[in-house]
């Protein structure tokens, strides 16, 4: 498959990000969100009928998937009868789904600005809790056929670069590092999540991308077919993302939601997240 070039400057992408957020804010409802749910339909999530059987639904940024799933399994073992259901995707898309009425108990986003929108929309009950931070890294195929060695190399005309769309946190972070470096990357494709960016680099559709350190590490550790590697760059520190988590107003079991939040923020949860490459908030 080939990628249709979309040579868009970061200035234009910034404008698109603002327009996208306004559009999300104006959407009143109806229809599916087109997010990246890893769960069944929302209706299926409320099918718990046993007095001792409970389901906790967690909406979380795609970059948290492996860590949250690991913590979720331990949470289920510690809470007999509880099933933790996850929906992972781009943070702005998750908030849009919640605004449209999707049922969930917990929200964890990949940056604070997206969580602020959830707060402004009245979706959460308590002050969000920052629990980890993350920075960007250049991801390239193991053979690095384009010879990418630095952030500036992503501006080479012959390099096919994919970025996250400006409306999602990793796309906003990419714009920040471009500004810090004084460069203008013109991506051939803009994706709705970091997993999509990594996927295009792994499949050979792109020469490089910008994703979080944790996404590169997760891919490197996923097995022999993990044919990507990460390249650090100094400007990444200019766009450190703080991840907040909060229980949702319409949680079906507020007490259980609070216990899961504790499982993420306590020492055991932090150990899992830091092993994945996340840093302290």
Image (cartoon, helix red, strand yellow):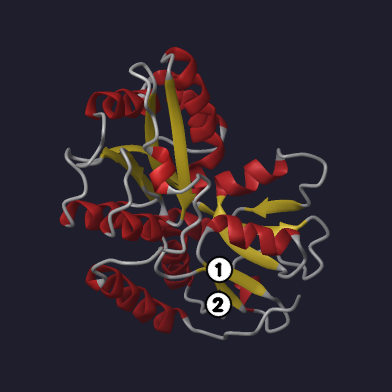
Q: What element carries label 1?
A: strand
**Quadrant for the N terminus in the image:** bottom right
Name the outermost residue toward the front. Answer: 49
277 vs 86, nearest the viewer: 86
Quadrant in the picture for residue 180: bottom left
**Label 2 near label 1: C-beta < 8 Å?**
yes
Q: Is residue 261 left or right of residue 213?
A: left
User: Marks 1 and 2, how far apart in space?
Assistant: 9 Å
Q: How crowded is mark 1: few (under 14 residues within 10 Å), some or many (20 or more)?
A: many
Percent x, y of residue 186: 56, 81
Residue located beneath label 2 in the image:
185
Which residue is at 63% across, 85% downward? 5
Residue located beneath label 1 in the image:
163
260 vs 116, nearest the viewer: 260
Percent x, y of residue 86: 46, 40
Q: What element carries label 2?
A: loop
Percent x, y of residue 97: 35, 57
**Quadrant for the C terminus in the image:** top left
Quadrant in the picture for residue 185: bottom right
Percent x, y of residue 159: 71, 77
């Amino acid at each position: 498959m080939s990628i249709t070039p979309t040579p868009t400057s970061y200035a234009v992408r910034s404008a698109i990000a603002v327009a996208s957020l306004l559009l999300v804010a104006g959407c009143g409802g109806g229809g599916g969100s087109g997010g990246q749910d890893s769960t069944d339909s929302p209706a299926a999530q409320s099918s718990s009928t046993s007095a001792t059987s409970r389901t906790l639904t967690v909406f979380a940024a795609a970059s948290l998937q492996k860590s949250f799933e690991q913590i979720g399994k331990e949470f289920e073992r510690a809470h007999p009868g509880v099933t933790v259901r996850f929906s992972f995707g781009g943070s702005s898309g998750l908030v849009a789904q919640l605004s449209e009425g999707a049922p969930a108990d917990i929200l964890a986003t990949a940056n604070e600005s997206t969580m602020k929108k959830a707060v402004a929309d009245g979706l959460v009950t308590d002050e969000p809790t920052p629990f980890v931070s993350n920075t960007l890294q250049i991801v390239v195929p193991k053979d690095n056929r384009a010879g990418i060695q630095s952030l500036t190399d992503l501006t080479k005309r012959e390099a096919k670069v994919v970025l996250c769309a400006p409306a999602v946190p990793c796309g906003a972070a990419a714009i920040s590092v471009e500004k810090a470096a004084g460069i203008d990357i013109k991506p051939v494709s803009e994706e709705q999540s970091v997993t999509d960016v990594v996927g295009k680099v792994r499949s050979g559709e792109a020469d490089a991308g910008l994703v979080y350190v944790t996404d590169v590490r997760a891919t490197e550790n996923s097995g022999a077919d993990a044919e990507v590697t990460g390249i650090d760059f100094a400007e990444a520190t200019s766009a450190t993302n703080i991840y907040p988590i909060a229980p949702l107003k319409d949680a079906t079991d507020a007490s259980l939601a609070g216990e899961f939040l504790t499982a993420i923020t306590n020492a055991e949860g932090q150990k899992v997240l830091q092993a994945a490459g996340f840093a302290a908030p």
